[in-house]
Amino acid sequence: MTSTRQRRRIRLAAALAMVFCASAARASSLDSGDAGWVLTSAALVLLMTIPGLSLFYGGLVRSVNVLSVLMQCFAITCIVTVLWVVVGYSLAFGEGGPLIGDFSRVLFIGVDGDALIGTVPEPGFAIFQLTFAIITPALIVGGFAERMRFSAAVLFAALWSMLVYVPIAHWVWGGGWLDELGLMDAAGGTVVHVAAGAAALVAAVVIGPRHGFPDSIERPHNMTLTVAGAGLLWVGWFGFNGGSALAANGDAAMALTVTHIAAATAALSWMLLEWARYGKPSALGAVTGMVAGLGTITPASAFVSPAAALLIGAVAGTVCFLATNLMNLKLRIDDSLDVFPVHAVGGGLGTILTAVFAGSALGILGGTEDIRILGQLRVQAIGVLAVAVYTTAVTYLILRLTNRLVGNRVSEDDEIQGLDLVSHDESGYAL
């Protein structure tokens, strides 16, 4: 029996081959159900950034910085879109070599309604992948929130998208060396979460903590915004993971199912741990646990069973809760909105656990994959380590460059006043 992994690899390999062969592409058969699902998923993933992540992050900062966070996410969406059309998509999904693609799809040349990726029109596939490219640098905003110049933030996002996200996307999804090695990453455990989390940690260390950290940092100013944003993230994640099947089929249905289960279980785990340690569960803990579960199930979503999703969610909520407390209380690194302990730890954990629970030998706790667990664990670990090391090194160099060009950090007086007025001459609550 052909495994889920084999079906997905065959489908994607054939699709990428079709992209660069017009006659083959036009000979392929359009499936309106598959196309409709991928187009819907693209809209869902964009919803995760605007307004989902924007509101989630915006509620967590001081009231004088809420608009700055919304603006950073909005600007990143626009900048990455332009770069993706000009050259990013071609470099990420062009044939190229093991490290980077080629220039055959620059300015979306040949990306028209007749070209198909499998059974989906290539423009839909390209925009679906664009939404992943958008949310990844937007996640990093949480690592430097409330203290980075707007000019530095947008310049950083542009450089990071091209120098970090695009190569890694090619490594894992575009036929690059990690794809050839056999890395199992259904929807971005490494490409999105490990990369964004590692970059946020580097940004937090290089730029330095907020004024008064950790003793006088204010609590989130509007948890209503944060919970609303979290709800949009949860719903949008169905497109994030389910849409990565590139078809409206059983693989997409199972990905959506395990995604929901892991999110709910992780949120419950985080709440119970917080309740036991601090005496009360918080809304912040619940939604943070949910995001941890979503990030952790992402790489495994195409490969594991619902029973495994329960365990993955429980482990995600527990491990990410402990990692967050370690960062804040012990290491005292001001990763403002906990991007590293939630996304990098969660994404890395999920990538490793994919090898544990994807195998068919585990019965109800296993998936349908014919793999050797120890061998696959080695591949998964290589993927996590390679992405983390590359991202860390290049992110550091980009931050050094942006600091030299425009200066990364606002002054202490500007930070105290708030970035809404300083950067935009507006207020998020000018009623």
Image (cartoon, helix red, strand yellow):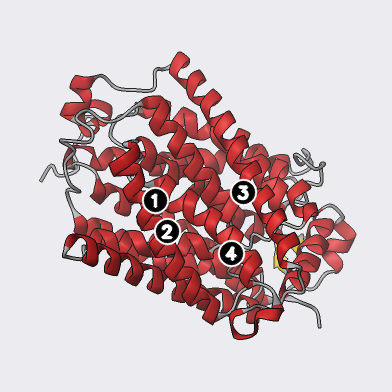
The residue carrying pointer 1 sits among few (fewer than 14), some (14 to 19) or many (20 or more) residues within 10 Å by Cα, namely some
What is the total number of numbered labels drawn onto the structure image?
4
Relative horizontal placement of residue 341, taking residue 34 as reference (left or right): left
Q: Earlier in the sequence, mark 1 or mark 3?
A: 1
* Relative image position of residue 88 (x, y in whole percent): 65, 41
Give the CA separation, mark 4 to mark 3.
12 Å
Image position of 5 with respect to 217: above or below? below
Relative horizontal placement of residue 184, taking residue 229 as reference (left or right): right
Contact between marks 4 and 1 (CB within 8 A): the answer is: no
Residue at the disc numbered 1 = 323
Q: Residue at the location (51% across, 74% down)?
A: 309
Give the CA separation, mark 1 to mark 3.
17 Å
Q: Amino acid at mark 2?
A: Val
Q: Earlier in the sequence, mark 2 or mark 3?
A: 2
Q: Residue furthest top?
A: 404
Contact between marks 2 and 1 (CB within 8 A): the answer is: yes
The residue carrying pointer 4 sits among few (fewer than 14), some (14 to 19) or many (20 or more) residues within 10 Å by Cα, namely many
Residue at the disc numbered 4 = 353
Q: Secondary structure at mark 4?
A: helix
- The quadrant holding residue 153 is top left
Give the CA separation, mark 2 to mark 1.
6 Å
Q: Residue at the location (46% across, 64% down)?
A: 294
Give the CA separation, mark 4 to mark 1.
17 Å
In front here: 286 or 271?
271
